[in-house]
Amino acid sequence: MNIESTVKATLIAPWASLLVVVFAFGSYLLEMEPDHFQQMLSQIPGLLFVLAMFVFGFVGTSYLLVLVCGVPVHLVLRKLNITHWSVYILLGVSIGLLYQYIQLIGSSMPSQLRETGYFSYAISSLLVATVFWYIAVKSHNKQRQHRPAGWTR
């Protein structure tokens, strides 16, 4: 196992969850009426603060899950010589959905908001797990492969 690639993946992969925030914010802006958009531009400091809170929330949660769950799972999978991307993605999405389920236990949140939460965590976990696998496993596997003499690419 390459510790350097695991550390790099741990530091970089959680930032992939920003795509969910960017998509949500972009779709909000596209659905906005022009008059409301002009009014929103006058409140840029407040808007930036709210956007920063979403960014810190998503990325912070992603870091927490990668450090507490993702890295130990990665270490076990590497010990078992399991390096296929589908296993990483399945486990990553499962961890994200389980975290969302635990958060919503005993909550009286409306079902539509619950579904949105599950969907965002599933997409965010999918992105983070894919980036983590690509950096920690795929790039490391390329270095380990032995090529026959005369092999060019």
Image (tube, rainbow, N blue to C red):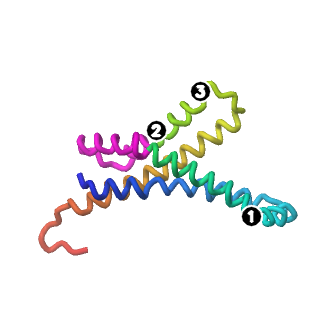
Q: Quick check: 18 left or right of 1? A: right
Residue 7 screen position, x and y as percent: 33, 55
Residue that numbered label 1 is attached to = 44
The main secondary structure of the magenta stretch is helix
Distance, label 1 to label 2, CA atoms, is 35 Å
Distance, label 3 to label 1, CA atoms, is 35 Å
- Helix, strand, or loop for circle 3? loop
Q: 38 above or below 3?
A: below
Give the magenta-colored segment's residue range.
66-92
**Could you classify mark 2 by the number of other residues whose Cα lies within 10 Å: few (under 14), some (14-19), or many (20 or more)?**
some
Q: Quick check: 132 left or right of 116? A: left
Q: Amino acid at mark 1?
A: Ile
Q: Quadrant of the C terminus?
A: bottom left
The residue closer to the viewer here, 93 or 102, is 102
Residue 32: quarter of image:
bottom right
Q: Amino acid at mark 2?
A: Ile
**Could you classify mark 3 by the number of other residues whose Cα lies within 10 Å: few (under 14), some (14-19), or many (20 or more)?**
few
Residue that numbered label 2 is attached to = 95
Q: Residue at the location (50% across, 40% down)?
A: 96
Which badge, 3 or 2, comes first in the chain's sequence?
2
Residue that numbered label 3 is attached to = 105
- Helix, strand, or loop for circle 1? helix
Which badge, 3 or 1, comes first in the chain's sequence?
1
